[in-house]
Amino acid sequence: MTIWHSLTYNTRLNSGLKTLKIWLGKYRIEAKSVFFFWERIKENHPKSYLTFLVKGQNLHAFCFSNDKITEQTTLSLSDDDRPHIVKYLQRYPHYPLRVILQGGEADFRLVSLKNVRWWDRASLLKQIKLGEFTSSDWIQKLRIPSPEDPYRYLLVGVRPSHSLKNLLSFLAKQSHPIANIQIWPIIAAEQTLKIVKERFPHSIIAKWSFIVLCQDNQQWQLIVCQDEAVVLSRQGFLSPLVSIGNDLSKEILATLRYLHRNGYQEGEPVTIIQSGFPEFINLDSTIPTEILQLPEIIHPQNLGLSYFSLFSALRLLNFNFLPSLSGQDTSFELPAIRSHRLAFLIPQLIIHLCIPLIILLFLFGGFFLVKGIKENQTHNFLSGEIASHTLSAETQKKLILAKLFQFYKNQSKPNLFPKLKSLATLISPQAIATELKWQDINTPTLNYNLKMTLILDTRTTEQNIKKSKKKISNIETYKQKVEKGMIKICPSAHIEWAPSSQKNSVSLNISYN
Amino acid sequence: MQKIKQKRTINLAPWLNPATGGITSILLLITTLMLCFFFLIKENYDTNRQNTSLAEKELTALQNDQEVFEAYESALTGSPKQFHEFRKKQFDRQVTLDDVKTRLQKWQKQFKIQMLNTQFGTDQLVSTELNLWKTPVSLDIKILQDKQFYQFLNKIQQELPGIIVIKTFQLKRITPLTSEILEQVSLGKRMSLFEGKIEFEWTHLDTNQNKNEAK
């Protein structure tokens, strides 16, 4: 499916600046490139070009050399005639090409969005487009501000025939640069009004103006303008039986009745500009009318290439606008064109890189901004908390004492001697320690270790045995006594006995908490 | 050719070309501004985060201080015995090595210790905030009775200013108790039956030392 995009160059607003009104977006940049490409063509070929006038099923080709028509031929739009078109184009290999559509294909719709809020305008225009035109139409939106209405838009829709679409696709594949595709009523209206202003400087063109053009001896064209913007275009055949003046007068009156729906008020003055007719139009009505007569016939082929119409260009998405030029013998310099193409590729590339980068920076920036604000709020809250928790100078002194006390509580160890005393009581009087070693072992389960060499008093233990009448050895009895006693002192204690080299002596190893 | 070259120069610098200069310049300007804006925001965020982190630490320290202070206050009223012990150990006062030596000499006489060899190790800083230092101390002793050794050890643990953590102690009988030794003792001679060694860590407050270190 071929998608057409219409582009705008508003000469009324931007001709002084020679720049397009651009918006962010690649299509806008392309629009600009079209205009500047066209400027380049004019620089290189100011006087040599081709004009294709599409009228009905015919294609009228005009070749201009030194701004004068050197050749004029009629071809057919049908696919069978393509070899002839190719042959014709090959004769003028690098001439820029301008296509003018003349016929009843164009529809106009003038919309006022003066009282609409700006954020609703785009949506409303889209709705109007959808309502008035079909998706296959080539639609051009133009803002034509008038003194009374700064937000006046003209929607121009062209319903291309199948053969016209095929022709343009075919032309796009050729080596000729297509300068623009123009609609005849708009070109004609602009050109006529321009001439009228030059010829009749004292005449004031009314709000509603009727441009009646004699196309040839058989056909007339009526173009209705409101504040110099085309709102309607009609075509008809001249009747040989009725006088031209009366015939066109009836047409104009009928059109005025029709225009009531477009805002024409009863009794409003109108200006009639007629061109190419031998007699004046006699409007048989009470409507105040001014009739201006232009003797010359305005034809599409009469317009020079430097003329850049309001309805300037239509852009195909699959259409390489900058042609690949073949042959080196051309005056149309290839490097210049390529560098020109680069000039639009670079900003496009920048747009493709910059816009996502800006979006990313915006998103991350926003994220960090929000996080930063939250962090700031947290910091403010914490500062408040710090202020409320800060101690006075006197309390600070006490705090040092409190910290020392805390440290003392944590670091100081319990007194060793209560347990050591109990142990000494348990060991004596049957034994005396000749050697001992106490250590702070500080293992996960046991904290202290005491290793002793004990000499047992056997006499005492024998007496004890006699008393208890138990037949066990002296040392074993003593060991049992110590172990039982140790359970009372420290249940988790670990006791080990080892023989000693001395007589009646043992080595005792106790680990306890 | 000159014309073409001139055009090329213009075209290769799209920001200078009136056709493309506007949008390119605006975009580059916006991108640059956005980058600056982004880095400023990021910088601001980092600073705020750092401030918050510092404030959090400060607040936590203050809350801990408050808890310590409350514990101290409750110890004053709730468990005065522990506080009394803290006061008695003079942990909040500055004690010098000379004080310790004086006390040890005093106890040497009191417990009739025949020989006392004292060694102090290198001081280690325990807490900068509180100016607390830890000194390892080693004592070699010769004594007549084991009872006196334990009394001396108990005295060190209970009455020496600061925190005393005993790491190890050893006691060994070096001579058996004979009638000759008893005779010598009765004549008033200083005799030793036991040989001992005590090692402990002494944690104490010393503001002067900290100041010297800082210098």
Image: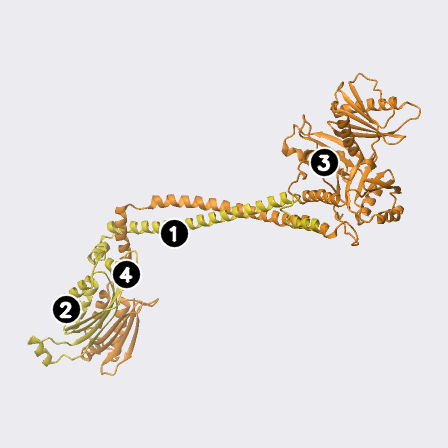
Among the two numbered marks 4 and 2 on one chain, the one whose residue lies closer to the N terminus: 2
Amino acid on which disc 4 is placed: Glu
Residue of label 1: B57
Instruction: Label 4, secondary structure: give it.
Output: helix
- Which lettered chain is shown in orange? A
Q: How far apart are labels 4 and 2 at the CA level? A: 33 Å
Q: Within 10 angstroms of label 2, few (less than 14), some, or many (20 or more) residues?
A: some
Residue of label 2: B108
Residue of label 4: B213
| Host chain of mark 1 | B
Amino acid on which disc 2 is placed: Gln
Q: How far apart are labels 3 and 2 at the CA level? A: 113 Å
Q: Are marks 4 and 3 in contact (CB under 8 Å)?
A: no
**Residue A429: percent from left, percent from top:** 18, 73
Q: How far apart are labels 2 and 1 at the CA level? A: 50 Å
**Colour basis:** by chain
Query: Does residue A407 sit above or below A366 in this rendering?
Result: below
| Host chain of mark 4 | B
Amino acid on which disc 1 is placed: Lys
- Which lettered chain is shown in yellow? B
Give the residue displayed 81% in from the left and 42% down from the top. A66
Task: Please state which of the two labelled residues, at mark 3 or mark 1, is closer to the viewer.
Answer: 3
Q: Do the residues labelled 2 and 1 touch (CB within 8 Å)?
A: no
Residue of label 3: A141
| Residue A68, image quadrant | top right
Instruction: Label 2, secondary structure: give it.
Output: helix
**Residue B3: percent from left, percent from top:** 70, 48
Instruction: Label 1, secondary structure: give it.
Output: helix
Q: How far apart are labels 1 and 4 at the CA level? A: 27 Å
| Residues behind callouts 1 and 4 on a single chain | yes
| Residues behind callouts 3 and 2 on a single chain | no
